[in-house]
């Protein structure tokens, strides 16, 4: 049977170009994006200039509505992860708050080809156009994507080349024995006239005190508490000393006049992922690179103590959750676990007291029943809950670094976030 096809033409309800026509008959909501990748003065001037230019430029066009200038300083363009203002602008655009985005160039927008194309396509899908001024590219132009692919690839390649040049310069500097310190966050040294580290004596005194206290048997937490109580500022200028800061000072080889360079390395120039160097790339050790604050023998002794006490604490942890976490406020020693028995009733119960309590001159810190320690933990969690902390969000073992017992009945919980909670027995 021969059937003759019947053809019906269904007219378009929303003809192509309607969106563009609608955009042309109403005012466009316009935003601009600016970025500089370093904190250098000349780059900061460029940043301010970009913000001022786009603000004036958008406001001067009567057909546009100024949404804002979104700008990031001192961040890389190779990925969008840490570019807060960029991500805020894209979210606003995808949710209907922006019609047009202006930016100076592809490299300012993104140096990652995949990111550039992906974001442009998402914006185009919701009717948002991006204009790259330097390249004169408009993403609504049908020919734009091919040119954008080529030019964003060139921007990415430029970023790779810059990264390689920087790495080469760093390796050359290391091989020449040149060292660089983050002086604003490094206790004991400042940059000298010859470019090498120079001792700041008032800060070096604090470093020597930290080493002396640790050799004398004080725990890292005790040292941190001591410096905090004396009102001494941390290398970063904070009033609260943390365990990690003290440990870093005790283990940094630069205090013995030596520098180990290339401790970390960047895995990929796009992701900027940094890893600890465990032999994946060459490292350089520079001896006698600058004047020492701690003599080498003392420094090496502290490293041995750090290893020994770390192993001891690890062994404690394997036996009991409280082990290694209760510290004597008198001598800085660790509380040990014992089982006591009441002769009259035969009742047995667990207690904790300083392992040095009966050595020579006894510590005056009290013995603690394990049940009492558990009650203290509940009280501490309640204190934290009153400040908005929900203990269900984190196990207490992760929350508490250790607690210090003092002979006046005070129990101070030193938390892993640097905070303290003080209770009284």
Image (cartoon, helix red, strand yellow):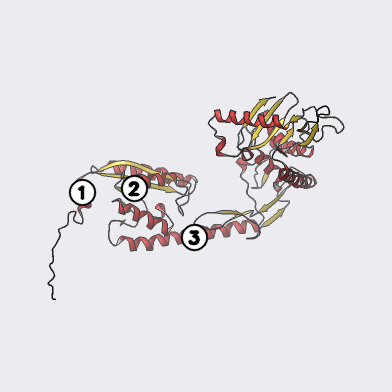
Assign a secondary structure to mark 2. helix
Choose top left, top right, bottom left or bottom right for residue 4: bottom left
Left-right relation of 117 to 307: left
Occupied quadrant, residue 31: top left
Residue annotated with mark 1: 22
Residue 187 visible in the snapshot: no
Front label number (2 vs 3): 2
For label 3, the residue is 160
Mark toward the viewer: 3 or 1 = 1
Separation of marks 1 and 2 at Cα, in angstroms: 18 Å
149 vs 308, nearest the viewer: 308
Q: Is residue 81 left or right of residue 150?
A: right
Percent across and percent down for residue 322 are 70, 38
For mark 2, what is the residue? 94
Ranked by sequence position, the earlier of labels 2 and 3 is: 2
Numbered disc 3: secondary structure: helix
How far is mark 3 from mark 1, CA to CA? 42 Å
Residue 6 in sight from this viewpoint: yes
Q: How many neighbours does mark 3 have within 10 angstroms: few (below 14), some (14-19), or many (20 or more)?
A: some
Whether residues under marks 2 and 3 lie with C-beta atoms below 8 angstroms apart, the answer is no
């Amino acid at each position: 049977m021969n059937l003759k096809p019947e053809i019906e033409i269904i007219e378009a309800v929303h003809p192509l170009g309607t969106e563009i026509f609608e955009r042309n008959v109403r005012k466009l909501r316009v935003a601009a994006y600016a970025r500089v990748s370093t904190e250098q003065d000349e780059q900061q001037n460029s940043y301010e200039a970009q913000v001022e230019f786009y603000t004036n430029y958008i406001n001067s066009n009567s057909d546009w509505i100024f949404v804002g200038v979104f700008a990031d300083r001192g961040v890389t363009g190779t990925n969008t992860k840490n570019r807060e203002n960029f991500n805020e602008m894209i979210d606003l655009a995808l949710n209907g708050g922006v019609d047009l985005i202006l930016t100076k160039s592809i490299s300012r927008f993104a140096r990652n080809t995949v990111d550039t194309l992906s974001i442009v396509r998402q914006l185009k899908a919701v009717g948002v156009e991006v204009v790259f001024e330097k390249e004169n590219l408009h993403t609504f132009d049908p020919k734009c994507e091919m040119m954008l692919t080529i030019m964003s690839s060139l921007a990415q390649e430029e970023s790779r080349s810059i990264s390689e040049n920087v790495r080469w310069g760093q390796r050359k500097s290391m091989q020449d024995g040149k060292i660089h310190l983050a002086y604003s966050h490094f206790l004991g040294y400042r940059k000298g006239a010859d470019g090498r580290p120079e001792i700041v004596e008032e800060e070096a005194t604090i470093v020597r005190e930290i080493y002396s206290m640790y050799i004398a048997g004080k725990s890292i937490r005790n040292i941190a508490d001591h410096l905090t109580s004396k009102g001494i500022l941390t290398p970063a200028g904070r009033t609260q000393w943390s365990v990690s800061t003290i440990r870093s000072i005790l283990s940094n080889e630069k205090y013995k006049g030596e520098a180990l360079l290339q401790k970390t390395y960047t895995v990929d120039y796009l992701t900027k992922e940094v890893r600890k160097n465990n032999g994946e790339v060459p490292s350089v050790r520079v001896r006698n690179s600058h004047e020492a604050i701690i003599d080498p023998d003392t420094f090496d002794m502290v490293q041995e103590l750090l290893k020994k006490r770390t192993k001891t604490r690890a062994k404690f942890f394997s036996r009991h959750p409280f082990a290694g976490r209760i510290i004597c406020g008198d001598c800085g020693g660790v509380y040990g676990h014992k089982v006591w028995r009441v002769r009259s009733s035969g009742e047995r119960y667990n207690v904790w007291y300083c392992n040095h309590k009966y050595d020579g001159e006894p510590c005056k810190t009290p013995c603690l029943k394990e049940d009492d320690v558990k009650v203290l933990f509940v009280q501490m969690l309640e204190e934290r809950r009153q400040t908005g902390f929900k203990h269900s969000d984190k196990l207490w073992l992760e929350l508490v670094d250790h607690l210090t017992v003092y002979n006046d009945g005070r129990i101070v919980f030193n938390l892993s976030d640097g905070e303290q909670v003080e209770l009284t027995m």
